[in-house]
Amino acid sequence: MRRLLKYTLRLAVAAVVACAVVLGGANALVMTATSDAIVGQADARSRAADAIVVLGASVNPDGTPSDILRARLDDAVALYKEGAGRKVIASGDNRELHYNESQAMKRYLVEHGVPSQDVFCDYAGFSTYESMYRAKNVFGAKSIVVATQEYHLPRALFAAKALGMEALGVAPAGEGAYDDQFSYDLREIPARAKDAVQALLNAPSTFVGDAIDLAGSGDDVK
């Protein structure tokens, strides 16, 4: 019995070590591969990428963006006005009938000066990786600027690059740490590894659907 317990303990320790090595290696790869792609707003000015992709986050019960989402949207507005991208893809979660991140995001963007026809809703951006996959394979983007928090940018950019897009990332200007920053940073460790594997395998998103032409009007996307 004692021998079995020792063997089981060794297996458990080996599994933990292996997991740590894989997670550490994947995170090092993601961070190293994207370090030069995270830039300031001035560096993205007049880039004229196919699209600015703003990544979704939680929406308040009254339909207004949460603080973390509002920061991303303000970032996207500034980037659009500076000419960083021709269109904006508001990529969020609309899995449930009464919860629609993309519509809330589009409403905010339009209220803050982005022309409605230039804002395309991606209702199936269920994860960071899926938002990147759909930006390329549904919306046809070859070059993008990603608007999200700095801690979140490396995995989005790694996925975009692995999928074959030219990509820069711009974090909200002047942002500081959030109340739950430690939990966000902790969550990124396995998330980076997961998204890196999906990107390297070119795994399809949950929903793909018909192609959407960014040369058209975002108001036609329902």
Image: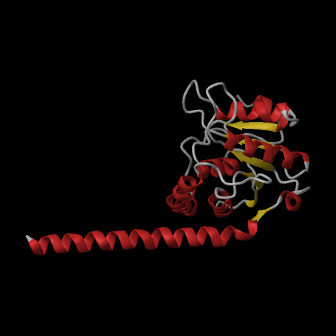
Along the viewing direction, whichever of 146 and 121 lies nearer the viewer = 146
Please report the residue visible at 71 percent of the width from the left and 54 percent of the height from the top.
176
Please report the residue visible at 89 percent of the width from the left and 59 percent of the height from the top.
42
Q: Among all residues in the image, which is located at the extreme left?
A: 1
To which quarter of the image does residue 139 belong? top right
Residue 160 location (% of width, % of height) = 67, 58
Q: Is residue 139 above or below residue 220?
A: below
* Residue 144 seen in the current view: yes
* Residue 86 seen in the current view: no
Along the viewing direction, whichever of 40 and 48 lies nearer the viewer = 40
Left of 49 or right of it: where is 7? left
How many discs mark residues in the rendered view? 0
Along the viewing direction, whichever of 16 and 92 lies nearer the viewer = 16
To which quarter of the image does residue 153 belong? bottom right
Residue 24 location (% of width, % of height) = 50, 71
Residue 81 location (% of width, % of height) = 90, 45
State how the image is colored: secondary structure
Q: Is residue 38 above or below residue 18?
A: above
Q: Among all residues in the image, which is located at the extreme front?
A: 179
Along the viewing direction, whichever of 209 and 149 lies nearer the viewer = 149
Please report the residue visible at 18 percent of the width from the left and 74 percent of the height from the top.
7
Please report the residue visible at 55 percent of the width from the left and 33 percent of the height from the top.
95
Q: Is residue 33 above or below residue 53?
A: below
Quarter of the image for the C terminus: give it. top right
Residue 67 location (% of width, % of height) = 69, 40
To which quarter of the image does residue 94 belong? top right
Quarter of the image for the N terminus: give it. bottom left
